[in-house]
Amino acid sequence: MKYSFIAQNKKTVGIDLLSQVLGVSRSGYYAYQKRQEHMRSDDHHEKILQAVRDIAIGSRYTYGRRRMKSALNKKGYKISIYHTSKLMKEAGISVRHRKKYKVTTDSNHKQPVFDNLLNRQFSVERANQIYVSDVT
């Protein structure tokens, strides 16, 4: 707010006097001005963000920042890995890790395999005739 006021009135009063009156540093104003210059290229920034989203969708969210950077570089956007990381965070994109397959059945064992006597016939004639359990 203070920096935007200085930017509006710098030609009439001067940056030194305005920064002293508002209690901000001159270098802070110039840093603000530099940030504003970077913000002006919004159309380029939006194009890069859209490219990040497209690459993420195309890769089914499996690309991290390194592969995302190389994909963006191939598309013509020369940006660093850290800028790529910031863009991914801004776009809300993160890597979705696949759950690793875990084998739960060991078919090669020496234990006896019992016959299926029930054969999905769950109706019984009297109580305590058949007992069923589940080991999962």
Image (cartoon, grey):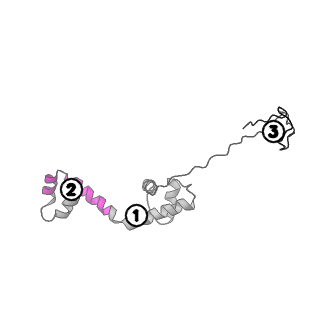
Residue located at (26% from left, 56% from top): 31
Disc 2 from disc 3: Cα separation: 75 Å
How crowded is the residue under tag 1: few (<14 C-alpha within 10 Å), some, or many (20+)? Answer: some
Mark 3 or mark 1: which comes first in sequence? 1
Q: Is residue 129 left or right of residue 47?
A: right
Residue 122 position, x and y percent, is 82, 42
Q: Is residue 28 magenta?
A: yes
Mark 1 or mark 2: which comes first in sequence? 2
Q: Please tell me in which quadrant of the rendered image residue 109 appears.
A: top right
Q: Which residue is at the front of the view, 89 or 77?
A: 89
Disc 1: which residue: 45
Q: Which residue is at the front of the view, 80 or 58?
A: 58
Q: Please tell me in which quadrant of the rendered image residue 118 appears.
A: top right
Disc 2: which residue: 2
Residue segment shown in magenta: 16-38
Q: Is residue 72 visible?
A: no
* Three-letter residue code for mark 1: His
* Three-letter residue code for mark 2: Lys
Callout 3 secondary element? loop
Q: Is residue 106 magenta?
A: no
Residue 53 position, x and y percent, is 50, 61
Callout 1 secondary element? helix
In the picture shown, does residue 109 fall above or below 9? above
Give me the disc on residue 108: 3
Residue located at (47% from left, 55% from top): 92
Mark 2 or mark 3: which comes first in sequence? 2
* Three-letter residue code for mark 3: Asn
**Magenta stretch: dominant secondary structure:** helix
Q: Which mark is nearer the camera, 1 or 2?
A: 2
How crowded is the residue under tag 2: few (<14 C-alpha within 10 Å), some, or many (20+)? Answer: few
- Quarter of the picture containing the N terminus is bottom left
